[in-house]
Amino acid sequence: MITVPLTHERRTVYWTVAAYGAHGHSLYRTTGLQSVSPTRYWHEYWASRRETARTELTEHTLVVANTLIGFEDLPGEGEPTLPPDLPAGAHEVKRFFKFTSALEDGSLTGHGPAVLRTGDAVRRFYDWTVSTQGHTHAVHVDVSTLRILDCTLTHYTREMRHDDLPDDVTTSLMGQLEAAGLYWIPVQESAGTCLRVPLADGSEITISGITADGREVSSRHAVQDHGGWVAEWDDFNDSFVKIYHSARQGLTHAADTAALASAVLACAREHGGGPVLKDEPRQPHSSEPGQDS
């Protein structure tokens, strides 16, 4: 059983590098690269090869959104699971289901298979879980606490230049946010892309970069342009606090980003951490075996 709290949304970023010959044939393609350093290495390596006519550098973003539903919301018997419409800029979208178990404090943890593709699969797994509770080697669970998650996986892709890659320190910041149970949303503004970090109490933190000349820009600006970070907390109710501003403090990029991460995580703890998917009182307990099959 998964024991980490479930969130409304989780975002993962990785990169791929592909190289092509003069006649368009594929020379090489990486698997998904979670770190910037190997991404940069493979792109530079293949770009410098004599036989390479063209390289492709692609950023992939996977967004998983979770929604609590009841048995009555599942596709009917024999019906396929219809995906939602493809969002703008998305390469692919998939929909699936899985079970979760409600804890005493209302938080939810995963239970059972990570992917159940149809309503029939959900009902079969529930019936099997109920029927095996008396078995010695069964995974024992209070079936009244089982809930169903409707999950949407959206895959976004973006072609990019080598110079547009974020640096390793910035990538580490995103990893620290994820490790702390926080998810971040890139938001395009006039000055560039900032990161917005929703918090459990409805407030949010906005992170922006500052160039060496003091301009607020993308959170993914080049290392040589780095002049600092700005992080601001906003509760959308006339409360607006700058929790970190490092411009002209003379910190290295790594030290600056570490201090930013510390300030953001401290603020997040004060406001309950990241949004966690909670059990809903109106959500009906799981039905009796076979009732919805």
Image (tube, rainbow, N blue to C red):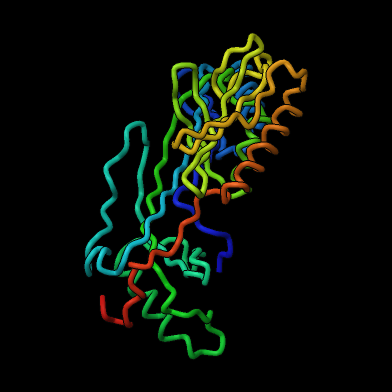
Residue at 58%, 17% in the rendered image: 163
Residue at 62%, 47% in the rendered image: 270
Q: Position of residue 117 (x, y in %)?
A: 35, 61
> Taking the image as drawn, is residue 207 in sight?
yes
Say whether residue 18 is left or right of residue 125: right
Q: Position of residue 259 (x, y in %)?
A: 72, 33
Position of the N terminus, as image quadrant, is bottom right
Position of the C terminus, as image quadrant, is bottom left
Q: Residue furthest front?
A: 238
**22 over 274 or under it: above or below:** above
Camera-nearest residue between 161 and 258? 258
Say whether residue 50 is left or right of residue 114: right
Q: Position of residue 290 (x, y in %)?
A: 29, 81
Query: Where, by quadrant of the figure, is residue 125 drawn?
Result: bottom left
**64 over 206 or under it: above or below:** below
Camera-nearest residue between 6 and 126? 6
**159 over 107 or under it: above or below:** above
